[in-house]
Amino acid sequence: MIMKEKGSTRAQGRVRYGQVDDGLGPNTDIGARLRSLYGAVQDEGIPTKLLDLLEQLDQAETRQKKIPQGE
């Protein structure tokens, strides 16, 4: 049983199975929209410019490892 304080200004969610439902669960409209957005971002390719920068970083790290320490 959840007791509400008289005059409380705190927003109360729905009670479901003994727990307060804040409306932000995975089966809500917000949850569905977040899944949709995440799926769209996940399906986007990696920009060529970013791939080029990562390749340059790999090359720089490889060159750094070849230089003897202390020089």
Image (cartoon, rainbow, N blue to C red):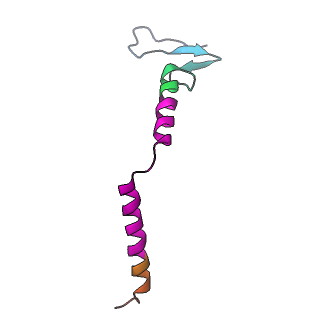
How many numbered circles does the render carry? 0
Where is the N terminus found, in terms of image quarters? top right
Percent from the top left, x then y, of residue 69? 40, 88
Towards the viewer: 27 or 7? 27
Percent from the top left, x then y, of residue 42? 50, 41
Q: Vertical placement of 64 versus 19: above or below? A: below
The residue located at (43%, 50%) in the rendering is: 46
Percent from the top left, x then y, of residue 41? 46, 39
Towards the viewer: 17 or 64? 64
Q: What secondary structure is the stretch in magenta mostly built from?
A: helix
User: Viewed as shown, does residue 54 lie left or right of 31?
Assistant: left
Residue 40 highlighted magenta (yes or no): yes
Which picture quadrant has residue 58?
bottom left
Percent from the top left, x then y, of residue 60? 38, 74
The residue located at (51%, 26%) in the rendering is: 31
Where is the C terminus found, in terms of image quarters? bottom left
The residue located at (35%, 56%) in the rendering is: 49
Residue 67 highlighted magenta (yes or no): no
Which picture quadrant has residue 50?
bottom left
User: Viewed as shown, does residue 18 lie left or right of 37?
Assistant: right
Hey, which residue is sitting farthest front in the picture?
48
Q: Vertical placement of 13 versus 68: above or below? A: above
**Which residues lie in the magenta part?**
34-61
Q: Vertical placement of 52 versus 30: above or below? A: below
